[in-house]
Image (cartoon, rainbow, N blue to C red):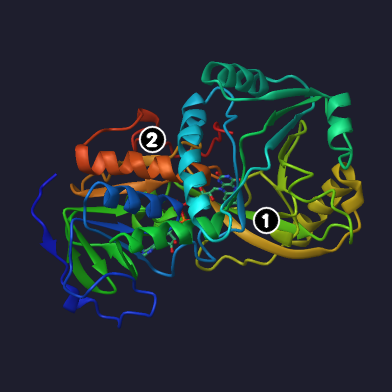
Amino acid sequence: MNSTRRTILAAGLAAPLPACVHGASMNEIFDVIVVGAGVFGAWTAEHLRRRGRRVLLVDQMGPGNARSSSGGESRLTRAAYGADRIYSEMALAALPEWKALSAAASLPIFHETGVLFCFNEMVDYARQSIEAHRALGVPLEELDRAALAGRWPQMNLDGVAFALFEPDFGALMARRGVEETVRRFTARGGAFRIAHARPGADGREVVLNGAPTRADAIVYACGPWLPKVFPALLAERIFVTRQEIAFVAPPDGDDRFEAHALPGWIDYNGGDVYYGFPNLEARGFKLARDTHGASFDPDSGDRRMSDEGAALLRAYLARRFPALADRPFTEFRVCQYENSSSGDFLIDGCPGREGAFLLGGGSGHGFKHGPEVGRLMADLVLDGRVPDQRFSYAAKGVTHRREVL
Ligand SMILES: Cc1cc2nc3c(=O)[nH]c(=O)nc-3n(C[C@H](O)[C@H](O)[C@H](O)COP(=O)(O)OP(=O)(O)OC[C@H]3O[C@@H](n4cnc5c(N)ncnc54)[C@H](O)[C@@H]3O)c2cc1C
């Protein structure tokens, strides 16, 4: 990488700096500017900082903000990925980073609840996950119905033939995790600013709140906004879909849905996939359907729960968690997945713009991998080390066909 350091033309930062500017003076010099403080951008900035670079992280609204894909309450971390062992390995590598962040934070970021995977029959995904865990030495319990019924009697097991249980994984507190990553990044010398960014005249220029600003490299980690930032390149390659989530109040005085009594879970019950969390930090039992929803605009999309979505979740509760069947919904959230054609991430240089990089395509499973994705992007920016071909722009198709689960 060109070691010349370019001065941010800070005087051109048109908007007054808001109160949440951390560690960035108006005349500071930066090597790399990262656009987007979701989980991918935050960890990229942190890895670049660890490698001695001066890094400016910008976001139009703030780390883990309410519209971002990283802005939810919780995200599952798991190593089971069927045949896609590359993601098992990435999840394993990312976990110690999350644990370290959690240990240093004042509130937990990782809850080691374990993750339970329910299946209605032995399918390739389960078989391949078992093989991968054996090869990688990751603990994985295989449970038949009797074992399941004894361990988690709060679940109705109709249609479940067997399950896998990963004891070492669990739930990440998503928004808190991103905030804490950025807090640590700024506490150790990184700079963060609120600014809207658009690509500038060439790959090494980014326009921040209207002001052209240069650095040796610009990383665009804009999540579901990537198709708007690079419409010619990504409008047909990132499919942004509407996803609906609900929280339910467990029965009063009943601790069967607390984190010590129920793991995170994914139910591959032969049709739609459902997943959820125990009553983490008393926010409520959380559940969602993993099916990709209708296309969604992260700026203008309606974030109110649909009646149809609420009814589906209610019916699922009645089937699998009967004690929750009539319990009140306490909260709904509508978020978006930013899917690539296959579900593989996008970690690559920006075609036609030397010095610029594209990062995204989290596809509904990216959060857990944030620390590893950030490391891969930092290696690409600083060393030109190209990650696996499946993360390339060239591998991204224009037909939405999910393959990674
Ligand atoms: C409902 C739901 C459930 C999920 N469940 C899981 C799960 O259980 N496990 C898991 O591992 N993953 C899960 N995911 C996926 C995971 O959350 C995402 O893959 C990940 O958060 C994507 O992060 P990101 O940094 O790419 O995008 P984002 O978090 O969206 O961050 C992008 C950031 O870029 C900023 N930005 C965009 N454009 C600009 C601009 N022009 N200028 C300045 N800033 C800009 C935005 O403000 C935003 O903060 C889930 C996602 C959703 C929505």
Residue 90, given in percent of the width and then of the height, sits at 46, 33
The reply to whether the C-beta atoms of the residues labelled 1 and 2 are less than 8 Å apart is no
Q: Residues within 10 Å of mark 2 (few under 14, many from 20)?
A: many
Residue 36 lies in quadrant: bottom left
Mark 1: amino acid: Glu
Residue 385, given in percent of the width and then of the height, sits at 25, 33
Residue 279 lies in quadrant: bottom right
Task: Name the residue rendered at 51%, 55% in the picture.
Answer: 177
Identity of the residue furthest to the bottom in this view:
16
Task: Name the residue rendered at 89%, 25% in the picture.
Answer: 146
What residue is disc 1 on?
244
Name above or below for residue 391 compared with residue 338.
above
- The kind of secondary structure element at disc 1 is strand
The answer to whether one can see residue 270 in this image is yes
Q: Where does the N terminus fall, quadrant-wise?
A: top left
In the picture, the disc for residue 117 is none
In the picture, the disc for residue 391 is 2
Task: Name the residue rendered at 17%, 67% in the picture.
Answer: 8
Residue 270, given in percent of the width and then of the height, sits at 76, 30
The answer to whether one can see residue 361 in this image is no
Mark 2: amino acid: Phe
Q: Between residue 42 and residue 233, name the one nearer to us.
A: 42
Left or right, residue 201 beside residue 37: left
Residue 219, given in percent of the width and then of the height, sits at 29, 52
Left or right, residue 45 beside residue 250: left
Task: Name the residue rendered at 63%, 66% in the picture.
Answer: 303
